[in-house]
Image: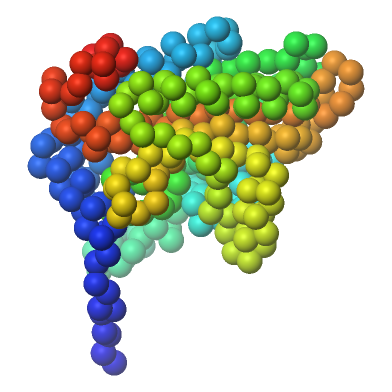
Amino acid sequence: MTITEPTTVPTALDRARAALRATLLEDRVLIDLGSPGLYGRTGVFEHVYAAVDTAAVRSMADLQSSVLRFPPVEPLAAFERTDYIASFPDLAASISAFTGDDRAHRALLAARERGERWESFLEPADLMLAPAVCHPVYGLVTGTIPQQGLWFDIVGDSFRREPSLDPMRLQAFHMHEFVHIGTPDSAKEHRDGRIPAMRSLLEGFGLEIDVVPANDPFFGRVGKILARNQVEASLKYEFVTPVYGDAGEATAISSANLHEDHFGTSFSITTADGETAHSACLAFGLERITIALFAAHGTDPASWPADVRRALAL
Ligand SMILES: [Zn+2]
């Protein structure tokens, strides 16, 4: 049997992505870890990343959100209630661990010695890598919420199994989210009311921004319907920036999402007047904003335009 490599000619977008990736690696902004979409980060990256995060937090300071932080893994039982596996099975990832005895360990080592895969000796550990940082909060507020609603400031690790050589698409990344749980009106107000401020914050970084209805990559045939509903109901808006110019579509670097009663129903959250709570979250994609900045202004922040440096307090 012969295996023939597909002979695909790289598109202008492929070339633009490869060029940005090469620049970020050569200029020591990111470090290649040998797996697509996984990078180490150097001081210059962290410097800009921290400045982006600080500016994002400052722009939401008046919400007086309660700060919550969660580990990068979540209990399987909590993950189940979000229904994520129904919509995005291809992005989800679970943790497995070795629970066997000496004999099973010897079998694992023998397989490894033979150059075989040994992960089948591991058992599911009832833990999932967190795909979205706001997920754990809904389980914490089950029951009746206060009249005025709740606001949370959440940042943490997210993992989505989406290997790509596009440096704008990482597998392990962070989002800083500002979540509101309240009534249908207050959730919509949280989502819509903040869009102009988020837009001007990102534009202040010297990025060209468009706000567009989002089209999440829901899985499979049913997913196509879900994606269409998401657009038609205008549930999610993305702040996109043309990282690769005319070579490809603009990339989302932040989003404003209305979940309606999705989490309120799944987690039995009710408002003071007994209705199912609605929720919304505003999410800053910290790595994506940071890399978009390097793409737009170059890899030396000292040479960035003065107004951009000022907006980021660099
Ligand atoms: Zn969220």
Q: Quadrant of residue 303?
A: top left
In the foreground, 230 or 113: 230
| Left or right of 85 in this view: 263 | right
| Left or right of 2 in this view: 155 | right
Which residue is painted at 46% across and 14% down in the image? 59
Give percent across and percent down for residue 150.
68, 15
Q: Is residue 161 above or below residue 209?
A: below
| Left or right of 97 in this view: 270 | right
In the foreground, 223 or 112: 223
> Could you tell me how many numbered marks the image carries?
0
**Image quarter of the C terminus:** top left
Which residue is painted at 27% across and 20% down in the image? 308
Confirm whether residue 210 shows in the render.
yes
In the foreground, 301 or 50: 301
Give percent across and percent down for residue 114.
25, 69
Q: Is residue 147 above or below residue 102?
A: above
Residue extending farthest bottom? 1
Confirm whether residue 134 shows in the render.
no
**Image quarter of the N terminus:** bottom left
Colour mapping used in the image: rainbow
Residue extending farthest left? 26
Give percent across and percent down for residue 208.
36, 34
Which residue is painted at 55% across and 7% down in the image? 62
Which residue is painted at 56% across and 38% down in the image? 237
Give percent across and percent down for residue 77.
65, 40
Q: Quadrant of residue 272?
A: top right
